[in-house]
Amino acid sequence: MLGFIKKDLLMIKSNFKILGFLIVFYIVMGFMGQMDISFILPFMCVMIMISTFSYDTFNNWDAYAVALPNGRLNNVKAKYLATILLIVVTAFLMLILSVIMAYSQNTVINWENIIFTLLGSVFGTILSLSFMFPIIYKMGIEKARICIFAGVFGIIILAGLLFKYVNLAGVGAMLAKLENYWPMIILAACVLIPYISYRISLKIYLKKEF
Amino acid sequence: MENILEVSNLSKKYQDFTLENVTFSLPKGMIMGFIGENGAGKTTTIKAILNVINKYEGEIKIFGLDNKKNAEKINTEIGVVLDEMFFPEILTPQDIDKIMAGIYKNWDTDLYQKYLKDFGLIASNQIKTFSKGMRKKLEIATALSHHPKLLILDEPTSGLDPVARAEIMNIFQNFIQNEDCSILISTHITSELEQIADYVTFINQGKIVFSESCLDIFDNYGLVKCTEEEFKQIKKEDYVRYQKNKYNYELLVANKKSFQKKYSISTIDKITLDKLMVLMIKGDK
């Protein structure tokens, strides 16, 4: 499986000039206070990994990958692990940047705030990869893009309608009761949600023909 | 003789194409050529053997094992070249080396580097800078570098110049010097097969026309060229197919010795795989 992870990371490395420029750009914007980069950088990892699906499709990689030892299983597993690895590395990078930023602006480091922001951004990106990957495996990258866009748009509309027409005061109160357990709940969700997503993707991929 | 690959009654239905009861077997230590025109079912058969397509009827055994139930074990011993390029173009041969070392337990970096050197491939160049022929060479180098026992090659020499083709055919011949190793090779360049193949399997419109040893094919099949008058005297059951040309008739006969005994036609030419294919597909019965 290591070979499959390497393949995705080497493909990302091949585009490092563009990625490096974007990362530096966002970090500079973050330091200038123009942009909150805590969500942008981890989310970029997911988008970068999605670009590897395009390369795979364009180059017929999947037809070859399934003929490799344990190809179907490892190809899917590697995609998830490489993405999560990138997210974790980026989260550490964000942690270091937050500390540097606090020092450079002579402000007190608010560890609780930093950790919560990081946890939130990691959770958000893991949630989005867990949502997107099975759709990509099912529909292929081209159709999946449209589907994901429609899905996100649908969720936003649904949430808007929910907030407008449903009294969510009860839900808010219930969530407030769980205040002390949120880090644990988010951590558990960060493991459980991608695992369920991986199982769905694998099930789709095992049946797929190329 | 022990078979390394057995395909039995393989059937697969598509909207506009059906693979029907494809059956053949490849003995250990042999090279089998898999021939047929475009769209005959060669790639579909190869994809089924490799589990690239997995919804089909029939049974496929590789190394005596069911190819679906034992895919992991089987795939470690197989080297593959598909008809379409499959390595991401932004990678380099150097990257492929690192990737494959993480996939195959018995990946041989030294052997891979030797093939790259022999094929004149620069390890640090991106694949997108390679010509079609160079890409095929890279795929072949990769297929050979984990010491597989079975090579399954779909059009491995397409896009290669004659010198490179000869070089690769030589590599394939060296590969089967080890009697445990075999090759299934699908190609349009049948002249190469005549030099290296021990068996030929011919598929047409999703059905196997024949799967025989080259020795039997060239011993038995023959090409008869005759005039219209001579043709009229030949019984239908004595030839397989015929083709009417501008000045003569060409007949494919399946048993040239008995044909020669029966008819006064003195010259029966040796059949080539190309001619055999053309007559089988385009000839009349």
Image: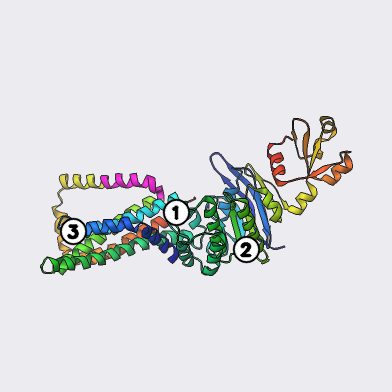
Give yes or no for contact between labels 3 and 1 (Cβ–Cβ under 8 Å): no
Estimate the spatial distance between the alpha carbons at disc 2 and disc 1, rounded to whole Å.
Answer: 33 Å
Same chain under badges 2 and 1? The reply is yes
**Kind of residue indicated by mark 1:** Glu
The chain identifier of the residue carrying mark 1 reads: B
Residue at 26%, 61% (x, y): give it: A122
Residue assigned mark 2: B63
Q: Which mark is residue B89?
A: 1
Cβ–Cβ below 8 Å for labels 2 and 1? no
First of labels 2, 1 by sequence position: 2
Range covered by the magenta-colored residues? A138-154
Q: Residues within 10 Å of mark 1 (few under 14, many from 20)?
A: some
- Judge by depth and name the residue closer to the eye, B160 or A166: B160
Query: Element under label 3?
Result: helix
| Residue B233 place in picture, x, y as percent | 85, 32
The label nearer to you, 3 versus 2, is 3
Quarter of the rendering occupied by the C terminus of chain B: top right
Left or right relative to B89: residue A22: left
Q: Disc 3 is attached to a residue of which chain?
A: A
